[in-house]
Amino acid sequence: MPKPSRHILFIPAILCLLISFTGFASPIKKEPPVKFPVITLQTLPGADSLSCIIPFSRAGNLILIKAKADTTVGNFILDSGAPNLVLNLTYFRDYPTTHFSDGEQTNITGSTAPMLKTMVSKFELGTLSYSRLDADLANLGHLENTKRVKILGLLGMELFRQCEMIIDYEKSLIYLHRIGRKEASSYQSPQLSNTADYSVMPIELKDNRIITRIELGGKKLRFIIDCGAESNVLDSRLPNAVFSKVTITGRVMLTGAGNKKVEALHGNLKDMMVGGQVIGSLPVLVTNLEKTCFAYSGCVDGILGFDFLSLHKIGFNFVTRKMYIWK
């Protein structure tokens, strides 16, 4: 396989994994005035430490969180497959932009337009506040049409690199703690007090993406953990031993950025081992992931999205590089 270009970037998996069917999307619904959800705040020792509990809603399999970019308030999608904050060009088109000539947006369906970058003076998420925050600009109109909701942007990994995040899909809550300098090696959420409730496994952060190791068909594979991916994805170029664990049930079309489409297979995989736990059966899409190679970190073998993450309460400490999977 050719060596990936140093300039190829993996854009949010959410833009790559929209399953396309014949038909027409309904107009985006008109939303009532947006109010911030009730936030439970716990101030901890150290001025750089904060905890909050953020309620979320869902658009299909995607997590929607209220946040504020300068004076604009509305829905943002939590997307750990995006390296940075991404703003919807539709609502931020008046912001000054910089063309990033050394990069291009790349996804499962291929390359799209050169990247546009801008800066947000102030960004607020729960009790966390960011100043002079760099952001990518992208047209998310096709995503809004599919989900029938106004979407201001995507919350990428750069926002959470100093945090512990626990996602409880059953209760629709995110427990977020910004880890202070003095507690970097010692902080642990009260939810982790009973070690029998969960398993722990290491993660890597490569180019602001969460990478974990899984075992399937006797092979050790590198997967992206992406809460912005609506489906799990497996690279079609993997060995036959891996596909002995996959039962194909049909075909779908994937829509990438710019509405470009590519055909994929869908099916079920069994006996995947993650963090010492065997996952009996999971839905999966099978397609060529050559276009998702990182600039400096090589390629991945698959993506773990909603169908995996929503099975458990799941947590991440991005400072100590650990993932917690509740049993």
Image: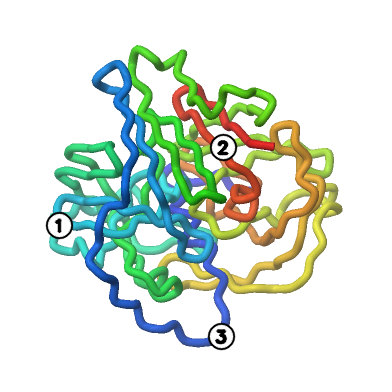
Q: In this view, does 150 lie to the left or right of 82?
A: left
User: Could you tell me residue 145's position as x and y percent?
Assistant: 40, 75
**SS at badge 2:** strand
Classify 80 as above or below 144: above
User: Which residue lies under the disc numbered 2?
Assistant: 211
Callout 1 crowding tier (Cα within 10 Å): few <14, some 14–19, many ≥20: few
Label 2: how many Cα within 10 Å (few below 14, some 14–19, many 20+)? many
**Helix, strand or loop at mark 3:** loop
Q: In this view, does 251 lie to the left or right of 176?
A: right
- The image quarter containing residue 221 is top right
Q: Relative to 236, is 257 above or below? A: below
Task: Left or right? Give the position of 257 relative to 61.
Answer: left
Residue that badge 3 annotates: 22
| Percent x, y of residue 290 | 59, 53
Mark 1 belongs to which amino acid? Tyr
Q: Which residue is drawn at 21% across and 51% down?
A: 69
Query: Disc 3 or 1, which lies upstream in sequence?
Result: 3
Question: Residue placed at 66% from the left, 30% from the top?
Answer: 197
Q: What residue type is labelled 3?
A: Thr
Q: Which of 163 and 212 is in front in this view?
A: 163
Image quadrant holding the C terminus, namely top right
x, y percentage for residue 139?
Answer: 32, 66
Q: What residue type is labelled 2?
A: Ile
Q: How far apart are marks 3 and 1 (CA)?
A: 35 Å
Q: Is residue 74 above or below residue 83?
A: below
